[in-house]
Amino acid sequence: MGRRVVALAAEDKDIQVTAAIDHAENGLIGQDAGLVAGIAALNVPLSAEWPGYASVVIDFSLPIAVDGCLARCVAAKMPLVIATTGLQDSQKAAIAEAAKLIPVVWAPSMSTAVNLTMKVTQQITETLKNVTGGVDIEIIERHHRFKADAPSGTALRFGELIAEKMDGDVKHVHGREGETGQRTRNEIGYHAVRVGDNPGEHTIVFAMMGERIEINVAASNRDCYASGAITAAKWLQSQPAGLYNMFDVLGLS
Ligand SMILES: NC(=O)C1=CN([C@@H]2O[C@H](COP(=O)(O)OP(=O)(O)OC[C@H]3O[C@@H](n4cnc5c(N)ncnc54)[C@H](OP(=O)(O)O)[C@@H]3O)[C@@H](O)[C@H]2O)C=CC1
Ligand SMILES: O=C(O)C1=N[C@H](C(=O)O)C[C@H](O)C1
């Protein structure tokens, strides 16, 4: 993702890429970030050192890197867009604390299509939750074989948003195996598929007795996430300290 963010940001006349950060052991440290991204040289070396200041920071990394990134941004008062998924609850709490001091956009999917689909699935849930015979809601996500976390942050967010619209306690069930017994009413099932180079696909199934709806939202490539993060970064620069998500950025709140 870092490569695509650099490449798309470099094409944007309103953006100057001033730093590209990775960890010190990365074999590409010292090489030009533009060349690493497959575009012309930017005269910005990929570095493990943070700049003193940048007007906004975009983080696509690993959970282990997020705490340090957050600390740097708070110390230098830099607005931060966090796209990394698979975070621990303690890290989510740290993000909320940091957002009291700096503006933060945090979202498991920067894609416009995904965020719109989240709204649609909430609407469907509200309409179907008390349908005669009941509705079973399951979330199937597909991603590339390199993905390190499961289920995807986006699938979990779909589940949270859908659960907000259901009545009573919701049980989140991750995969099924063995003598599971019959499906209970108030559960949401999650299924993580890892295949080839899939850039991200989510299918939300609303199944009733006799008919069903399946909503599928799929990326053709990863640029929807990179350009969404860039849109978020531009928007964030004029916001006060606070915790925002892509609904806020896209005007869907
Ligand atoms: N919100 C969204 O829309 C999207 C979110 N994501 C999420 O973004 C994250 C990154 O995805 P992706 O680019 O595919 O993953 P990659 O593993 O390809 O990239 C992660 C990068 O972070 C680097 N890194 C590791 N540790 C550190 C550190 N301490 N400081 C700085 N950089 C570090 C890695 O370096 P090295 O390879 O040397 O370890 C690597 O270059 C994932 O959590 C993914 O789920 C992805 C797409 C969209
Ligand atoms: O790792 C990925 O590739 C993606 N991760 C995000 C997630 O976990 O939801 C977003 C997108 O689906 C791509």
Image (tube, grey):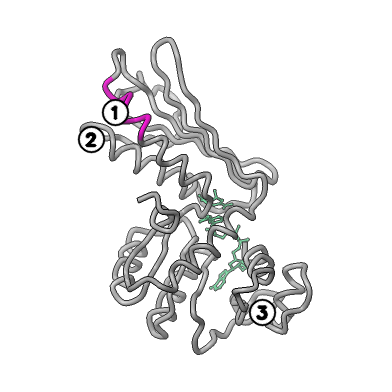
Tell me if the residue at label 2 has its CB under 8 Å from ligand 2: no
Residues rendered magenta in the picture = 123-130
Mark 2 and mark 3: Cα distance apart in space: 47 Å
Q: Is residue 238 left or right of residue 193?
A: left
At 29% from the left edge and 70% from the top edge, which residue is drawn?
A: 97
Please provide percent x and percent y for residue 104.
Answer: 39, 68
User: What residue sits right under mark 1 in the picture?
Assistant: 186
Foreground of the two, 157 or 147:
157
Q: Amino acid at mark 2?
A: Asp
* Element type at mark 3: strand
Who comes first in sequence, dot 2 or dot 3? 3
Vertical order, 236 against 83 (above or below):
below
Who comes first in sequence, dot 3 or dot 1? 3
Please provide percent x and percent y for residue 175.
Answer: 45, 33
At 32% from the left edge and 26% from the top edge, which residue is drawn?
A: 127
**Most frequent secondary structure within the magenta stretch:** helix
* Element type at mark 1: loop
At 69% from the left edge and 67% from the top edge, which residue is drawn?
A: 7
Q: Is residue 237 left or right of residue 198?
A: left
Verify CB contact (< 8 Å) between mark 1 and mark 2.
yes
Q: Quadrant of the N terminus?
A: bottom right
Verify CB contact (< 8 Å) between mark 3 and mark 1.
no
User: What residue sits right under mark 2 in the picture?
Assistant: 169
User: What residue sits right under mark 3 in the picture?
Assistant: 46
Please provide percent x and percent y for residue 18.
Answer: 61, 82
Mark 1 and mark 2: Cα distance apart in space: 7 Å
| Structural crowding at the residue carrying mark 2, measured as other residues with C-alpha within 10 Å and reported as few (<14), some (14–19) or many (≥20) | few
